[in-house]
Every structure is written in C-alpha cells, then in structure tokens.
Image: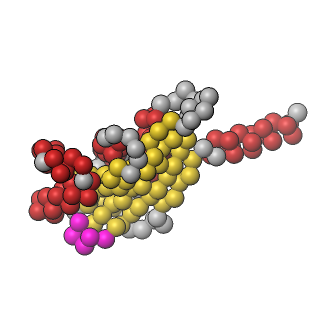
Amino acid sequence: MRWSRAWLGVLLVFVLTGCSVVKTTPERTALETSARWTLLPFENLAQAPQGAERIERIVSVLLRSSGVQLADYPREARKDPLLLVDDRARYQKALAWAKKQGFRYGVTGSLNEWRYKAGLDGEPAVGVTLRVVDLRSGQVVWSASGARAGWGREGVAMTAQKLLDRLLGDLPLKK
C-alpha cells in the first residue's frame, strides 16, 4: 500500500507540473521595489483582441501586491488610431514618456497565446514573455517566458494569472 501511494505521489507531481513551462533569467542583482517603476505596453502576438491589455492588467495587480509602486503609461495615447493597431508605436511612445518622467524600471512583454484549445475539454492555453528594462541604460535586467495549459473548466484569465504569478514570483525584488 505504501509503495503504490509513493508512486501515486510521484505521478501527481508530474501531472501537475506537466501543464506549464517556465523559463526565467538567472537571478541577478535585486531590483528595488522603492525605485520608480512603470508599466509599458505589451505586444499582442496572439489572435485575442485586446489580449495584451488583459495581461497588462494582471501584471499590474500582481506587481503592486508584491510591493512595487507601479505607474501606468498614459492611456490617452490610445486616442491616436495608429497607436490602436501598432503595438510597436504604442510601446515607443510610452517608452519616451517613461524616460522623460524619470522612471527607473519599465515592465513590458508580449502575449504569445490566449485561447481555448480545440477539442472536447477546450482547455485554456496562455503563453507570455515578460521583461524588466532599466530605463536609464536600456538594458533588460530580468526576463521570463512561460506557457501554461489549464484544466477544462478553468478560464483563460485564471490560467494567465497562475502563470504570471509563477513568473513574477521569480522576479528578484528587494524591499
């Protein structure tokens, strides 16, 4: 009986970890939560309309809950029709604003997948990359990438939040 419980435990670990893939940069110098941080636009590489904005909102909440004093880039920049469809232009405009405002770190990334898989269960699938950029030097000081598939009755947003929470859990923060 003990032997079968041990194998069941090992199997459960493989099943639970087999639903996601995560890769982060090796830990470097800790990033201070007291520094000035800003959220920058994310690039939407998925076919989900406004998917990048969804990821931005989740990242924003998770970083704030970790003690980061995070400012959002100005939303009025979205009134320009070009900025509504061109993620790169939106990012460049927000980056120029952030540097002018004197922010130290910018958080950005891309949404690579945001969908329900085809099939009977229709499991949610999310893929994301994250980057923290030192706005003074332009260097990426931390990055992470991950993909996760949820369970059949789980929503895409829940799957995304679990993945982002795991990715941001590796962010080397110093309070």
Q: Residue at x 33, y 40 (%)?
A: 49
Residue at the spot 24% in from the left edge and 49% down from the top edge: 85
Residue 65 in view in this figure? no
Q: Is residue 3 left or right of residue 12?
A: right
Q: Look at the image and tell me in which quarter the N terminus lies.
A: top right
Furthest residue to the top? 153
Q: Is residue 4 above or below residue 59?
A: above
The coloring applied to the image is: secondary structure
Relative to 26, residue 58 above or below = above
Q: Position of residue 6 (x, y in %)?
A: 80, 41
Frontmost residue, 109 versus 105: 109
Residue closest to the eye, 145 or 113? 113
Residue 11 position, x and y percent, is 75, 42
- Whether residue 143 is visible here, answered yes or no, is yes
Considering the whole magenta stretch, tell me its main secondary structure: loop
Name which residue lies at 38% across and 51% down.
45
Residue 168 magenta-highlighted: no
Q: Position of residue 92 (x, y in %)?
A: 20, 61
Residue closer to the observer: 173 or 145: 145
Image check: 77 left or right of 7?
A: left
Q: Which residues are magenta?
A: 135-139
Reply yes or no: does residue 138 show up in magenta. yes
Spot occupied by residue 38 in the image (x, y as percentages of width and height): 23, 53
Identify the residue shown where x is 60% and y is 33%: 119
